[in-house]
Amino acid sequence: SRSISLAVIPGDGIGQEVVAEGLKVLSAVLPQDVKLETKTYDFGAKRWHETGETLTDADLAQLKEHDAILLGAIGDPSVPSGVLERGFLLKLRFAFDHHVNLRPGKLLPGVKSPLAGDPDIDFVVVREGTEGPYVGNGGVLRGGTPHEVATEVSLNTAFGIERVVRDAYARAQARPRKKLTLVHKNNVLVHAGHLWKNIFDKVGQEFPEVTTDYLHVDAATIFFVTQPERFDVIVTDNLFGDILTDLAAAVTGGIGLAASGNINPSGEFPSMFEPVHGSAPDIAGQGKADPTATVLSVALLLQHLGYRAEAARIEEAVAADLAERGEAQRSTSAIGDALAARLS
Amino acid sequence: SRSISLAVIPGDGIGQEVVAEGLKVLSAVLPQDVKLETKTYDFGAKRWHETGETLTDADLAQLKEHDAILLGAIGDPSVPSGVLERGFLLKLRFAFDHHVNLRPGKLLPGVKSPLAGDPDIDFVVVREGTEGPYVGNGGVLRGGTPHEVATEVSLNTAFGIERVVRDAYARAQARPRKKLTLVHKNNVLVHAGHLWKNIFDKVGQEFPEVTTDYLHVDAATIFFVTQPERFDVIVTDNLFGDILTDLAAAVTGGIGLAASGNINPSGEFPSMFEPVHGSAPDIAGQGKADPTATVLSVALLLQHLGYRAEAARIEEAVAADLAERGEAQRSTSAIGDALAARLS
Ligand SMILES: CC(C)[C@H](C(=O)O)[C@@H](O)C(=O)O
Ligand SMILES: CC(C)[C@H](C(=O)O)[C@@H](O)C(=O)O
């Protein structure tokens, strides 16, 4: 019989509320014969305040035993900016080699886009997750003086780029439009930019059916708002991907709906799935958070574990719910209940 | 009697056409007693093909003698990507210490935004122009092999940040809303991010009337499309500024309208003014380019040289023209003529 061992990290703020609904939907959609085992971990601001720990080697060893990780949100204003982001979120991405950071951008029926005319948006951003300006490489000289110099080093390797580019081509190949756009800034960041472009062109030879395209990151942001229909699959570096995926979330109805997967395609480490929105402390604990992004992250999780039919059923349920929802304000659990009801 | 010595660089593609209209409008708006002397320079793709030169020391010495520079566009598909961008545009910015890269984002009446509901947008981005990831610092190890490593180094100095931050505060102070937003990514790019934030907070003490705000760059892109009204003055680093100002141009009606100034506030070197759009080779030579962004860049130029009334008159003429224009397609010179007629 089949089973899923899931690490659950509710985390901070609305993370607690939305993860509860994500699990509700997961239970509702899974076939009877699949045994779901969950273990909840207490990472986040509270634990950091109590112990000073964000994510220890022992934690990583425990997490590694699971098939996948579902995360709500990590981050709280009571913790200095960057401590949990780097000490937990980025540490996990790097430790578990989550090099494919997958972020779909789809405007679902019934959802209002801030763009006029509700354009037809359906793309996926494949963001590199373990290199680039995110490596934490850099430093400070003469700190705190008028002569301070601070550096940030973006590290890019042929190995790291090639694997994510190949993954993106395979995703493009599997979609009807079969189009892949590389986004970088190779007219200015020439060293990294040329490496990305060369590998992009080289790997493309393995995928003759995929149409390719290159855009500078600044031009890409223009097309995100003027012509988002033009995108199918986008592959880009860690920082450009961070920026573009928030913009993608905005034009497809907001980060309340944006799902993401931090994927280790080889399966050597468990992949992690999380809504893009963060902990939203201003509305935490009030039952106001929209759990849809978490539910869609659960769909990505199921997809990754090979439960394609179940993933598709969740996406359909969400689409139907959003189309019906209209302007009605429902509570976090009411949305979760409605989705679970559609699925069981 | 007063005089302006202007270096004119039409450049490539539509640069030629739009600069002609910019000069037409400049002549029309200048008071009789101001003597305008222009000298045209042939920088761009053609010269590079003929001589291999982009911008020599002798060129820089000549340009330095002028009061200001008006540029159309530099860049052509016949030249490898990056050669003219770095060899001309960035070289000029760095050589003339254009550390204040000024880019207004204003949705003028009559202009359609891709955003629903045509929001009230009126902000200015102050982009640092001489540091950050644009310094060309980085390299390649094991180039062309499967073990290639490419780096890009972002250099940030207290000196460089403080002067642009102070300039941005002064601009915010002079505007009715008196609000300044710092955009960075200090939860990940900690070294540079903290330096920016510390200086931002320190300089803020000199401007007690200015309200301040901090946003991560990813969140800023969301607000650019969901709540652009919230911005007044934005200060940010070179790369984030590059990305945000293209997005700003998109939401305020397109890069056909976006003006920019590459400013050396001390006046040690002439400042350079250019439309953001680039050379648009696909429509070059057809009289289809909109010269409005160049005309608005001329307004920024006049403002910089102290001709405030004339700058304001150009802005009013552009606003009136856009409000009247509607969907009508006019040629490049027809738009220039209409604007000049309003001004003389
Ligand atoms: C919280 C932060 C470290 C993170 C990132 O920059 O990757 C977030 O913005 C995201 O996109 O997941
Ligand atoms: C052409 C390029 C070097 C330039 C930049 O990146 O600064 C352009 O995008 C701009 O914004 O002026």
Image: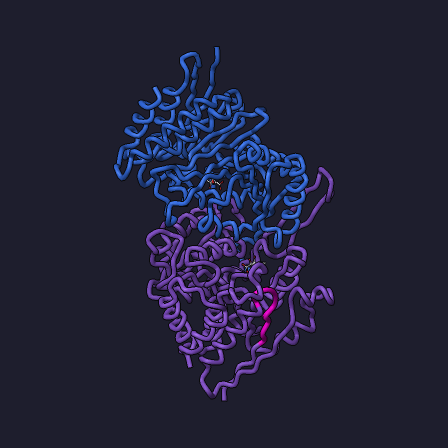
Chain colours: A purple, B blue
What residue appears at the point 58 percent right and 45 percent down from the top-left corner?
B213
Q: Position of residue A289 (x, y in %)?
A: 51, 65
Seen in the picture, residue A302 relative to B28 is either above or below; the reply is below
Seen in the picture, residue A133 relative to B320 is either above or below; the reply is below
Asked whether residue B94 is in view, the answer is no
Seen in the picture, residue A132 relative to A296 is either above or below; the reply is above
- Looking at the image, which is closer to me, B339 or B96? B339
Q: Position of residue A307 (x, y in %)?
A: 44, 78
**Quadrant location, the C terminus of chain A:** bottom left
What residue appears at the point 49 percent right and 63 percent down from the top-left corner?
A164
Seen in the picture, residue A140 relative to B93 is either above or below; the reply is below
Q: Position of residue B54 (x, y in %)?
A: 47, 32
| Residue A180 placement: quadrant | bottom left
Q: Is residue A284 magenta?
A: no
Q: Is residue A335 left or right of residue A264?
A: left
| Residue A201 placement: quadrant | bottom left
What residue appears at the point 52 percent right and 49 percent down from the top-left corner?
B220
Identify the magenta region: A7-15
- Looking at the image, which is closer to me, A125 or A52? A52
